[in-house]
Amino acid sequence: MEWAAAALRMVLQVVKRAENAVGFKVLPRRWVIERTNGWLMRTRRLARDYERTTAAAEAMIYWSMTALMIRRLAGRSR
């Protein structure tokens, strides 16, 4: 977390469940990360770590998100 704050000038907030919470409760903004991870895991090559370098893995993440956005922007053909 310190690396993200120093290198990227990002503020990282860890959202945790309350100690006295009972049952299911939606945690704030956590769904955004969970949804994004779900989209990425639909790409077979990202479901496992096949890449030899972190640069190649990062490129696959960019490729996957680019393909997702292209599909969404193109919409359904009629």
Image (spheres, rainbow, N blue to C red):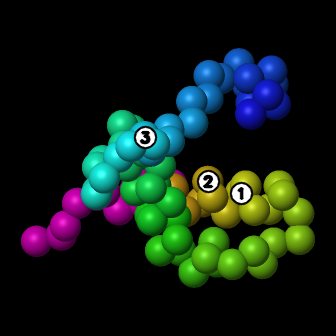
Query: Looking at the image, do the residues carrying marks 1 and 2 touch, with CB atoms under 8 Å apart?
Result: yes
Q: Earlier in the sequence, mark 1 or mark 3?
A: 3
What is the distance, in whole Å, between disc 2 and disc 3 at their CAs? 34 Å
The magenta stretch is 66-78
Q: Amino acid at mark 3?
A: Ala
Instruction: State whether residue 44 is above or below residue 62.
Output: below
What is the distance, in whole Å, between disc 1 and disc 3 at their CAs? 37 Å
Eye-nearest disc, 2 or 3: 3
Count of numbered badges drawn on the protein: 3
Query: Looking at the image, do the residues carrying marks 2 and 3 touch, with CB atoms under 8 Å apart?
Result: no
| Residue 67 seen in render | no
Instruction: Judge left or right: residue 77 versus residue 60.
Output: left
Eye-nearest disc, 1 or 3: 3
Residue 39, x across and y down, in percent: 44, 64
On the image, numbered disc 2 is attached to which residue? 62
On the image, numbered disc 3 is attached to which residue? 18
Residue 29: name its quadrant: top left
Task: Answer few, some or many: residues within 10 Å of disc 3's Cα (few below 14, many 20 plus, some between 14 and 19).
Answer: few
Residue 40, x across and y down, in percent: 52, 64
Residue 74, x across and y down, in percent: 28, 58
